[in-house]
Image (cartoon, rainbow, N blue to C red):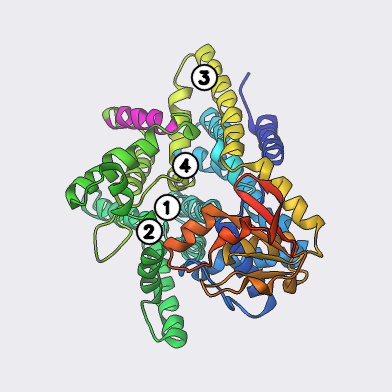
Amino acid sequence: MKITPKYVLPSIIIAGILLRIYFNIGHIFSDDAYYSYLSYTLLDGEFARDYLGYPIFPLRITFLSITALSFNVFGINEFATIVIPFLLSIANLILTYKLAKLLTGDENVSLLSALLMAFFPTDIVFSTICFVDLPNIFFINLGIYFLYKSYKLSKNHLAIVGGILFFLSMQIKENIYYTTILLIILLVYIIVQKKNFSTQIVIALLFIVLNIFIEGIVCLFFHKNLLYRFTLLQQNYNYSYYDFFPHTAQKIGNVKNYWRNLFDQIFIINSKAIFLRRFYLFLPIIASIKSMINIRKKENLLLTFWFLGTLLFLIAFTTSFTEYKPLDLKRSWYIYPLLMPMIIITALFINGMKRNLRYILVCVYIIGGVIMCTHYEVYFNKENKSELKSFIAENQHRKIFADHFTKYSVDLIRCYSDLTKSERIPGSDFNWTELHKGDWVLYNQKHIDELKLQKYNFPDFSILKSDLFGRVKNYGDFIIYEKVE
């Protein structure tokens, strides 16, 4: 009996929805605090007022706008921050099926690709976290779908749709640069080797150039800087230098030799992060092996080019245009640019095996995906953070003092209902007598340590262990102290 998507694809989508609901993570007191705050100020009409955080984040206006829209529809609360990533993750299952069908023409491979995406642990977990990576890559991949479809059907209006999606993605995160370079290489290949010309690729590239031009004009008007985004990218690097090369590589070799650090970053840190990370269930290795087979057999070369090109850029592409500084891939969600081609190539690999072996591998993959989701829950300390969020929400009347980073999370959990009930603990001259009896201090040593690396100053927190304060609760790294005298 021929497999059709009539019942299989809806079943995969339902399974994907149930998994994402069950493993819902929610707010994690990380970058999502900044995105939530910026989206709230965008909706409130005072965008980025009094904002302290990564310089590049306010330029991610597409993501901030759709999150603000979600606030407007679902209310200003934590749930609204995860609606868009959740919906896009589900839509991505359909896109995976459609894109795999377009690239391979194989129904079984397309369904298997959707299944692999539905159970891929990183996508499951980040469908309920207010991060930019999933939405950004969804827009790019959807643009690739329309662009390739326009090429196959010779319908330029579909390329325009793809270009618009690329345009929107550029205001979320800078991963579009990978796609841009790949498109330029592909265009040159078509012109030189095929003696042909792709109007569709040119249209897509024009939209990318148009975005840079329009953004430059806007930034020139507001900030007197035509290259404001690139200026902020450099400021962002300086702001969180400890997360970028060479500082990341120096932690491995404990040396400051550029070439040794470069080798460590690319071949030890980044390659290990891609190929030997348990959250990825060995899919990058499988896709790489299948890519070598594709090249030898001259099969699925466009898909292979997409995968290997993205893999190379992810591991070794520079984060600076003035110096060669590869991205550090220690964060597992950086896999997103590679995810779609990796999934489809892996589906091709599995589909080429005997039926019984294929079923066994899929079952092992599904079990592994579910297990890794539980590992993600431990990684993000879901239990403690859920209890902390409930405790803060239940005590709306308490005034909470915290570092600015943590304060953004407190305000979101309380739905920005009364901003006078939270206060920043500013520089080293902060006067602890400003706290009244019954006020709380929400303290996280890891947050303070990272903020100090970002050049923020803080008072002496050892006073929290004095007789002036008493410990109320602790949830993992978060400790709540109450002013008792």
Most common SS among magenta residues: helix
Q: Is residue 178 visible?
A: yes
Badge 3 vs badge 1, beta-carbon distance below 8 Å: no
Please state which amino acid type lies under the numbered disc 2: Ile
The residue tagged 3 is 361
Q: In the image, 133: left or right of 322?
A: right
Q: Any magenta on residue 285?
A: yes
Which is more toward the observer, 443 or 47? 443
Residue 151, numbered label: 1
Marks 4 and 3 sit apart, C-alpha to C-alpha, by: 19 Å
Marks 1 and 4 sit apart, C-alpha to C-alpha, by: 23 Å
Residue 201, numbered label: 2
Q: Earlier in the sequence, mark 3 or mark 2?
A: 2
The residue tagged 4 is 339
Marks 3 and 1 sit apart, C-alpha to C-alpha, by: 35 Å
Can you say whether 400 is above or below 345 in the image? below
User: Which element type, helix, strand or loop, lies under badge 1?
Assistant: helix
